Structure formats: C-alpha cells, structure tokens
Amino acid sequence: MAIELNEHQDTRLKQLAQMVYAHCGMNYLDNLPMLASKVEGRLQELGISLWEYTELLKDRHAAEWEKFVIAVTINETYFFREEQQLQELVELAREALAVKPHLHIWSAACSTGEEPYSMVMAFDAAGIPLHRITVHASDINSKVLENAKRGRYHRNSLCFRRTPEVLKNRYFTLEDDWYQIQARIRERVHFYQLNLLDAGSIQRLPFMDMLFCRNVLIYFDAATIARVLHSFYGQLHDGGYLFLGHAETIRGQELDFTAINRSNTFYYRKARGVL
C-alpha cells in the first residue's frame, strides 16, 4: 500500500524525518517521497497507518526502531569501489609499516562488508602481511552487518561488478550460487554496530591510522558533517589519513587536516606528527 502524499501525511512524514535526523543524522526533510517509499514495507507488515507508526516510534519501541533504521539507511556498495583510493591506501600502509608494527584501519558505514574486505584483499594482493593489519568496520544497520559478517554474496550480485575474475577466484569459494570469502580474509575484519553520531562509542574504538568514510557525508547537513568529522579527527592518530567520497570535502571545517593529492587520489592527513 503506497503512502498517498497529502498535507496530513506530509506532516507525519516530516515527524519521521526529524526522528531519523535526530537519531542518525540522515536528512530526509527535503525528500519525503523517498522516506515514504522506505517505510511503506513496515506499514504493510504491521498493518497500521502512518500516524500509528509514528506514535509507535515516539514511544521509543526499541525493536521497531531497529527495523526502522534498517529500512531508512542506504546500503549500495560493491567490491573495489574507487579502486585508486584502495591502491593509495596500500601504498600508505606499506610506508607506515616500515616504522610501525601494526596498523588499525576503520571502514565507517561499511554496509554489507565489501569495502573492508576489499581493503584486506588489496593488502594481501600487494604482499602486505595480514597479521600486521586490523580493519575495523562499522555500520548503524544491524541487518547489513549480519550479512557482512557472513562474507557470503550471490554470484549474480552487482557487488562484483568491479571485481577482477582473478581476485574473485583467489579470495572466494563458489558454493552453489554463493561466493564465500576466505576465512583468512574475513578474520582480519572486526565488525561493530555503531552510530556515527555516538561520540562515546567511537571513542571506545582503537585509535586509527587510516579511516575511510565514503559517500556517507552527502546524506548529512552541515551541522551533522561537522559533528562526525570532529569525532573522526579525535579518533585518528596524529598523521593519520582520512578518505572521503569524491563528492565530499572537509572544506569549511575547523580541523587541522592537510589536503593531499597523490596518484590522482585526493585525501586528508591529520597534522601534528607522523605515523
């Protein structure tokens, strides 16, 4: 049952949009039709109206909030996305490991795991010892994290659209119609359910040498971007690196990052010290 947009429904959708914004920073206030399309399934499954659903969430119904977050978060990703950034990450890791025994790398908003697993595969393909790397991967969406931890992807999934066959054959085992990533790759990634607005939870993570948060900030407004970047800055070692999506920038933020453009790849380095 599609939600018919009218003045009354718009009011309820705006309330939902404000709840989403307060909880995880995603801004649907300017795109109520998209929000409507994402919650329709929950209304149908529960057999309730948009008004009743809004009231349920206002009551802080924990189980439904979890399902609501799953419905409204965005999870499109694929292996070896923006490969030049991964190649630069490998080179930075190689340089850092010449002076450090171990690196911690964070894939923020990791979705179903393609990004952190791509990192580990890229390190391995470059001959970097995996025992010297730990990749931390987080997402607010518990459902995609369950899939990520399994490391199992359908053979026809678009997540493989940039994966060379040689790497698919090297790092995955085909079981029926599903590709299972190798255990030695999977075990280098530690997954966490984490809200990027929860500074306290972020501070409980290890300090990071490199941090990837790609194609996430585009869904936030300026105030939320500032809040998230402040947490990222605090969690990076001095001299640590921050990678964002191509459409994202820290311009206008009062943070001590240096912009770097190397090998046709743009990223940022936290000042004051070296890795």
Image: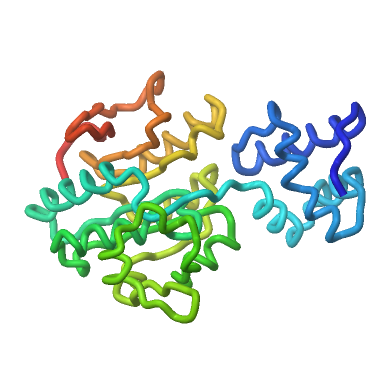
Q: Which residue lies furthest to the top in this view?
A: 252
Please name the residue shown 78% across and 52% down the image. Answer: 60
Q: Which residue lies furthest to the bottom in this view?
A: 175
Is 91 located above or below residue 63 in the figure? above
Is 260 located above or below residue 157 in the figure? above
With 83 as the anchor, is 98 left or right in this view?
A: left
Please name the residue shown 49% across and 39% down the image. Answer: 216
Is 109 located above or below residue 153 in the figure? above
Residue 7, quarter of picture: top right
Coloring scheme used = rainbow
Location of residue 97 in the rendering, given as x and y in whole percent from the top left corner? 12, 55
Q: Which of 21 and 218 is in front in this view?
A: 218
Number of dots carrying numbers: 0
Please name the residue shown 15% across and 40% down the image. Answer: 274
Residue 130, quarter of picture: bottom left
With 48 as the anchor, is 127 left or right in this view?
A: left
Location of residue 273 in the rendering, given as x and y in whole percent from the top left corner? 16, 37
Location of residue 169 in the rendering, given as x and y in whole percent from the top left corner? 30, 71
Q: Nearer the viewer, residue 176 or 264?
A: 176
Location of residue 139 in the rendering, given as x and y in whole percent from the top left corner? 51, 54
Please name the residue shown 88% across and 44% down the image. Answer: 50
With 47 as the anchor, is 65 left or right in this view?
A: left
Is 261 located above or below residue 39 in the figure? above
